[in-house]
Image (cartoon, grey):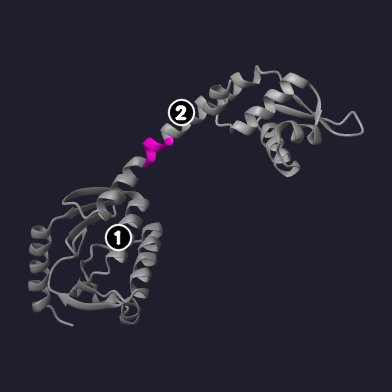
Amino acid sequence: MDELFTRLGFSDKEANCYKLLLENGHLTASRLSKLMGESRTNTYMILERLEKEGLVEADESESVRQYVAVDPVILKQLVTNQQLQIKQTQQLLQQTMPELRSQYNLSQLKPGVVYLEGLKGLEIMLDDMAKSKEEALLIPGGPVTGEAWETLKTGIAKRAKLGVKTRVLFTEGSKSTIDPQLHKKQKYEVRYWEGEEYPGELVVYGNKCVFTAYEPNIINTILTNDIIAKTMRGVFEGLWANARP
């Protein structure tokens, strides 16, 4: 019986309390505490857990409250409930695993490719940028709106609060839409280059290159590789040198 209760998640004291009630029928908390060798406070805590799990009931028919064990068949329902919880946990783990793996791969700085999708993926990438505290080199794509923009603003604000700088290359054609005061607040250093606006976005920080598409769905592809990051940083610096403030 002890092994059964342990597998069901009960402590030795809880198992002992239930067995005493099975053997003795109705017992007061005072009598139980003496039989168990426990304080009244601990006994009430044990009884509360057993009541919550449906193994014990309180009998208020007498002047002093007594406790009685419920039919042990209830243990079958507990096993069924646990099986259901395990199944639900497995489903949740399967859903969450890609996010957990992405966060692990990013934090471990392992060379390779991490694919992040949706708003949560964008948030993970922005958090990683903030944690790195590395200057970011950014070539933005087309306009970002809605929830994606709100998520971006939060990530940018976090980096700015940490004092992390970002150099940004906008196209000359987008100059009229730029707010210099906002970018100053965001720790952005901005230059403009001759060229067409790209539909996607590129950012380099540390040894990572991030390629982002916001439409039709948010997709971040992150390459962690020293050589590729150095190459893309060189491309950016070449454009930056020929761009105008």
Question: What amino acid is labelled 2 in the image?
Answer: Lys
Residue drawn at (58%, 20%), measured in percent from left and top?
1
Q: Which residue is mark 2?
A: 87
Majority secondary structure in the magenta region: helix
Judged left or right of residue 26, residue 220 is left
Residue 107 visible in the shown view: yes
- Position of residue 67 measured from the top left corner of the image (x, y, whole percent): 78, 29
Secondary structure beneath dot 2 equals helix
Judged left or right of residue 230, residue 138 is right
- Position of residue 180 measured from the top left corner of the image (x, y, whole percent): 30, 81
Task: Judge the density around disc 1: few (<14), some (14-19), many (≥20) Cα neighbours within 10 Å.
Answer: some
Q: Which residue is mark 1?
A: 128
Range of magenta residues: 92-96
Residue drawn at (50%, 25%), measured in percent from left and top?
83
Secondary structure beneath dot 1 equals helix
- Position of residue 217 measured from the top left corner of the image (x, y, whole percent): 31, 49
Residue 216 visible in the shown view: no
